[in-house]
Image: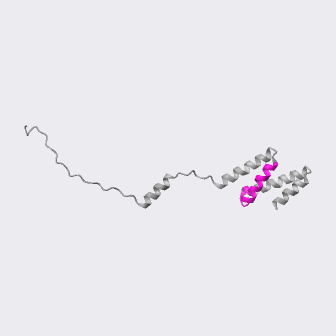
Amino acid sequence: MDTATATPRRKRQPSVALPTPQASPDADAARDDMAVHEAPRPAPQTVLMRLFRMADGHRQRGEPNQAIEMFLELIEQHGHTPEGRMAQECLMEICDEYERAGKIRQARALYERLL
């Protein structure tokens, strides 16, 4: 073999073992947090407004008993919110409607539930 035309041999590089990366506890916790994807919860105000609209829909469709129960629940559980106050106004209007229709007992019973 002619040394002028032969390709020179490469020297072998000694193999170097690369260190195995060690995960830190913080990295493990972050990975665990990302693994559990929970759907974001809607804002409470959004849910309350939807509940109010459902109750008002019952009222508008002539279903006062369903509306009254939903309005009362909004008031009892969320009376401090705007939706709770609107529910109370709606119940007062239902009482007025009962009185105008001569349904005094129903109006009185509802007034007492509002106390």
Which residues, given as a range, are shown in magenta?
A: 64-84
Asked whether 49 falls inside the magenta stretch, the response is no
Q: Where in the figure is residue 88, as x and y percent of width and height?
A: 78, 56
Residue found at the far bottom of this picture: 115
Residue nearest the viewer, comparing 53 with 70: 70
Image quarter of residue 110:
bottom right
Q: In the visual, does 45 lie left or right of 55? A: left
- Residue 82 forms part of the magenta stretch: yes
Quadrant of the image containing the N terminus: top left
Left or right: 14 with respect to 34? Answer: left
Left of 29 or right of it: where is 41? Answer: right
How many marks overall? 0
Residue 47 placement (x, y as % from top left): 67, 52
Magenta residues, dominant SS class: helix
Colour logic: one colour
In the image, residue 27 above or below residue 59: below
The residue furthest right is 102
Residue extending furthest toward the left: 2
Instruction: Please state the horizontal and vertical placement of residue 93, each as a whole percent of the image.
Output: 83, 53
> Which of the image's four quarters has the C terminus?
bottom right
Q: Which residue is drawn at 18% across and 48% down?
A: 12
Left or right of 19 in this view: 64: right
